[in-house]
Image (tube, rainbow, N blue to C red):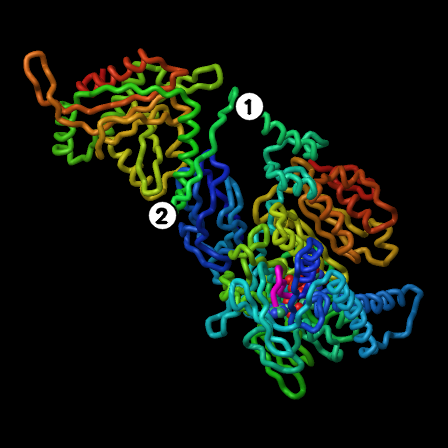
């Protein structure tokens, strides 16, 4: 029995890169052995063998972009009877490799099966374009899958490619008003000034970098600052950890408080869609997680219906996956609002960049004991600085100040969260 | 010696790359260890095999017509003359290549090349060693027949090169390997009067082609051969004075039989591991293939590889197309890329088998939905008028768009007919395009249009059951 293995449903991802192929044709694999490793912009994902067998052929190569359903390899499922080893004849051309020789006989090198090149996916999904047109598109660097042909049966013509290019050239001017006319990036020969070392950016950094740059340029950001008195909350947290044997961090409380604040200020749980505002009736909260390769934002789903202990456990589990590069795209989708907490590290405040298409992001810095005037004397209180960056196209200053007040009130007296 | 572009190997890949690069203005040196250009294909592959297959066809057609009112005397092959004629064909082509090289100013160096660094090779020739420095290189070192370790050395044990030498016609010939090369040689030696047995380890001849395409060939060969043993293997060969005692193990058990000659045609091994490629830093995989990207670059950016040495299918027309890409990229055309959607395969057996693109077997294995149009040649006037009705033309379409995904043809001249299907796939043609293109009557090419009509439901030459 041969079993074609395809890319499993990895969420709404069409161009995961193959970064590792752990098997080769002829290898025997057990059920759940890892066959290949994919990397999306946010996570790596291992594809395991669904059953035991022998790898017959592999139709992808390292670096290939794949999506749900792409054929990866063909597995010959092992049947009860072991297949008899055969040494003798195989065919001459384009034949699958014969099974390996028995140990007594010197191993024979067999030609590998056809490389992927000769195995282009034979489906009607390939662009309807002739070889000469495909060359023309390559010369212009045009991806034909992005063009809808105007010829008979959707055939792509030379004019279609030219039109696509023309549109691409016109577009930035049309959509970005005057466009950004920026000075060229400064070119500096750093080595002239001292020793340097060049390090390639990780894939996560490259992709999140492009997203952050877009968000920073496109969204009119404003950041408000406030301080939350978390003296009682932190005492409560310490006590929970002691009595429950749990490991609850301040982040879990902030997430829970953020949900309550979003409920009170629904415009913060929203996204812009053209001239419409999409208001969300669900509460999925993202949190920034630091990993050796860069920043990722896993999402706690339905945080409104989860308790503090659940949220704490889930943030810990997601952070661990993130550090190992094993988050699935689905773990990072659907967020309504993001919390970025640097409390464990330090700082007195910062201006986070909004995680589009969300409209606000909360930053929390390190809580510190500060003297607070209670009307008659200074009291030592644990004060946590918070900042809220918001999209001025959707929210205005008064609303933002109101949101922060709600949030700080909740953090100061956490019982209100349940009100 | 110093050159801009060095090409190692003068086969279809190598000479095409050298000529294309020279036409693009590069200074080119082409090295081959053979005396003549043309590589395996011209010297010991495609061309001599096709010359002999032509001879076989003439013999077989004469024999067939003897039952229909055209009796000839039984053919008496004169091997010396036949060999001379085959050689004359090769000579004409290889000399033609030599003069094309001269006209283009390509320097041809003869000797065995070994890398000594990323920009230098040493060539060992009959007149000693010489070093050649290069800016860029294209490796087109090809492949050679695979040997089996348990088979001894004996003049009666030959590979495809030995078979093409046509030293003698054995009484009983065992062909080990029922792939294209093995069966082409079976066709030749059968026509010349040998009694032939074929042993193939897989469960069908020409694995890789669809079973229904192979069936007519299998049937035809079964009538002509002593035996065709599929799912069988040779496990021992003992040379004796009176013959070769060969042990064959198959489904029906093991037996030892005596043959006069053994042709080993179990596949070809790439020459990648014999170039000292490590000295240049070029990666060679465990089987001897050199991995390349879509622009035919190896892991070393200024060194390219093409043809049999980069992977299956090992076919001359794949090598020549890859050659042009490598030559163009090496000459500065960054947009050139190996972008062919399909590579046709042909077995020049009797009957011929040809296929291109998706096969039914692969569609089934990978769960690809297909629609099928089949035209049996028994309904083709032309097929009947050449006395051959066992052929079939099968087209596989995308059921949603009707676009042609693959084709398989069995019958005389299938190799010539498959080119239309290859063009149709590259152009994105659908069943209606093929059906509405007027094909000349009466030709075998009509069967392509009729197979398309069997799919579109407009066929009148046959009664096709309506599709649900
Ligand atoms: C019997 C037979 C029949 C065939 N029939 C067909 C057919 O009908 N159609 C088809 O498409 N294909 C056919 N083939 C396959 C075809 O011959 C090959 O695919 C084709 O020759 C590959 O071309 P190439 O340029 O990659 O290598 P080759 O033709 O193998 O040429 C490589 C050359 O490099 C030389 N070389 C290798 N190493 C060195 C070195 N270190 N220094 C110097 N020179 C070196 C070799 O001597 C050789 O001349 C057939 C093969 C055989 C054996």
Residue sitting at x 42%, y 30%: A213
In terms of image quarters, where does ligand 1 lie? bottom right
Residue segment shown in magenta: B1-9
The answer to whether residue B82 is left or right of residue A184 is: right
Q: Residue at x 82, y 72 (%)?
A: B85
In magenta segment, residue B3: yes
Q: Position of residue B354 (x, y in %)?
A: 72, 55
Q: Is residue B231 visible?
A: no
Residue A126 shown left or right of residue B354 in the figure: left
Q: Is residue A409 visible?
A: yes
Provide the residue designation for mark 2: A196
Query: Numbered disc 2: what chain?
Result: A
Q: Position of residue B273 (x, y in %)?
A: 54, 67
Mark 1 — on which chain does it sit?
A
Position of residue B362 measured from the top left corner of the image (x, y, whole percent): 60, 50
- How many neighbours does mark 2 have within 10 angstroms: few (below 14), some (14-19), or many (20 or more)? few
x and y percent of residue A396 in the render? 35, 13
Q: Residue at x 75, y 37 (%)?
A: B432
Q: Residue furthest bottom?
A: B241
User: Is label 1 in a helix, a strand or a loop?
Assistant: helix
Tell me the residue that label 1 is attached to: A173
Q: Quadrant of residue B437?
A: top right
- Residue A400 vertical placement versus B438 (above, below): above
């Amino acid at each position: 029995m041969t079993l074609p293995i395809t890319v499993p449903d990895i969420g709404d991802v069409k161009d995961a890169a193959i970064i590792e192929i752990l098997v080769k044709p002829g290898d025997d694999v057990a059920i759940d052995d890892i066959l290949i490793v994919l990397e999306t912009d946010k996570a790596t994902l291992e594809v395991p063998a669904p059953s035991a067998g022998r790898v017959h052929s592999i139709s992808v190569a390292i670096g290939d972009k794949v999506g749900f359903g792409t054929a990866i390899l063909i597995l010959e499922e092992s049947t009860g009877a072991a297949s008899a080893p055969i040494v003798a004849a195989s065919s001459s051309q384009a034949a699958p490799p014969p099974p390996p020789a028995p140990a007594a006989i010197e191993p024979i090198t067999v030609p590998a099966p056809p490389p992927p090149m000769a195995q282009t996916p034979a489906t009607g999904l390939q662009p309807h374009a002739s070889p000469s047109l495909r060359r023309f598109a390559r010369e212009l660097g045009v991806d034909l899958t992005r063009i809808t042909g105007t010829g008979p049966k959707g055939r792509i013509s030379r004019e279609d490619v030219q039109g696509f290019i023309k549109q691409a050239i016109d577009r930035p001017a049309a959509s970005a008003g005057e466009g950004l006319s920026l000075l060229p990036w400064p070119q500096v020969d750093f080595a002239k000034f001292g020793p340097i070392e060049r390090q390639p950016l990780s894939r996560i950094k490259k992709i999140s970098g492009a997203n952050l740059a877009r968000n920073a340029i496109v969204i009119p950001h404003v950041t408000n600052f406030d301080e939350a008195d978390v003296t009682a909350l932190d005492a409560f947290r310490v006590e929970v950890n002691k009595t429950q044997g749990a490991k609850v961090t301040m982040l879990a409380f902030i997430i829970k408080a953020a949900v309550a604040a979003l409920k009170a200020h629904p415009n913060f749980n929203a996204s812009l869609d053209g001239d419409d505002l999409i208001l969300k009736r669900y509460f999925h909260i993202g949190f920034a997680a630091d990993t050796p390769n860069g920043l990722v934002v896993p999402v706690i789903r339905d945080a409104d219906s989860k308790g503090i202990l659940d949220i704490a456990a889930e943030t810990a589990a997601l952070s661990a996956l993130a550090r190992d590069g094993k988050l699935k795209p689905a773990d990072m989708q659907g967020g309504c609002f993001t919390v970025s907490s640097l409390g464990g590290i330090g700082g007195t405040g910062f201006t986070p960049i909004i995680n589009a298409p969300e409209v606000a992001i909360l930053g929390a810095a390190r809580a510190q004991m500060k003297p607070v005037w209670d009307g008659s004397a200074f009291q030592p209180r644990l004060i946590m600085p918070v900042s809220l960056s918001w999209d001025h196209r959707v929210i205005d200053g008064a609303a933002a100040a109101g949101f922060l007040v709600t949030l700080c009130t909740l953090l100061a007296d956490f019982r209100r969260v349940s009100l | 010696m110093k050159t801009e572009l060095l090409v190692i190997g003068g086969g279809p890949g190598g000479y095409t790359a050298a000529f294309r690069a020279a036409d693009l203005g590069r200074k080119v040196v082409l090295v081959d260890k053979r005396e003549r250009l043309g590589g395996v294909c011209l010297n010991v592959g495609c061309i001599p095999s096709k010359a002999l297959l032509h001879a076989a066809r003439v013999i077989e057609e004469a024999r067939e017509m003897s039952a229909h009112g055209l009796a000839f005397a039984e053919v008496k092959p004169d091997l010396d003359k036949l060999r001379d004629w085959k050689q004359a064909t090769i000579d004409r082509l290889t000399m033609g290549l030599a003069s094309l090289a001269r006209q283009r100013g390509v320097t041809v160096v003869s000797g065995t090349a070994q890398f000594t660094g990323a920009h230098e090779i040493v060539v060992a020739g009959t007149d000693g060693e010489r070093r050649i420095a290069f800016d860029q290189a294209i490796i087109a070192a090809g492949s050679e027949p695979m040997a089996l370790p348990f088979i001894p050395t004996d003049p009666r044990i030959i590979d495809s090169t030995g078979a093409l030498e046509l030293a003698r016609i054995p009484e009983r010939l065992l062909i080990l390997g029922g792939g294209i090369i093995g069966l082409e040689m079976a066709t030749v030696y059968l026509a010349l009067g040998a009694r032939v047995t074929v042993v193939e380890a897989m469960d069908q001849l020409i694995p890789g082609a669809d079973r229904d395409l192979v069936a007519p060939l299998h049937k035809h060969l079964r009538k002509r051969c002593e035996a065709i043993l599929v799912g069988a293997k040779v496990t021992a060969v003992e040379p004796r004075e009176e013959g070769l005692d060969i042990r064959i193990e198959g489904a029906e058990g093991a037996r030892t039989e005596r043959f006069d000659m053994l042709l080993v045609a179990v596949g070809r091994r790439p020459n990648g591991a014999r170039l000292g490629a490590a000295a240049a830093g070029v990666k060679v995989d465990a089987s001897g293939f050199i991995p390349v990207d879509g622009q035919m670059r190896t892991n070393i950016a200024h060194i390219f590889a093409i043809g049999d040495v980069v992977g299956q299918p090992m076919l001359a027309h794949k090598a020549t197309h890859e050659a042009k890409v490598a030559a163009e990229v090496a000459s500065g055309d960054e947009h050139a890329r190996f972008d062919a959607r399909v590579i046709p395969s042909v077995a020049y057996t009797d009957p011929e088998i040809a296929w291109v693109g998706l096969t039914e077997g692969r569609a089934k294995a990978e769960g690809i939905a297909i629609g099928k149009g089949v035209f049996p040649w028994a309904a083709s006037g032309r097929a009947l008028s050449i006395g051959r009705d066992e052929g079939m033309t099968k087209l596989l379409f995308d059921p949603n768009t009707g676009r042609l995904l693959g084709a398989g043809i069995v019958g005389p001249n299938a190799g010539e007919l498959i080119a239309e299907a290859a063009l149709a796939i590259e152009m994105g043609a659908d069943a209606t395009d093929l059906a509405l293109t007027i094909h000349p009557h009466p030709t075998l090419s009509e069967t392509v249009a009729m197979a398309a009509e069997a799919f579109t439901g407009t066929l009148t030459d046959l009664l096709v059951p309506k599709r649900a």
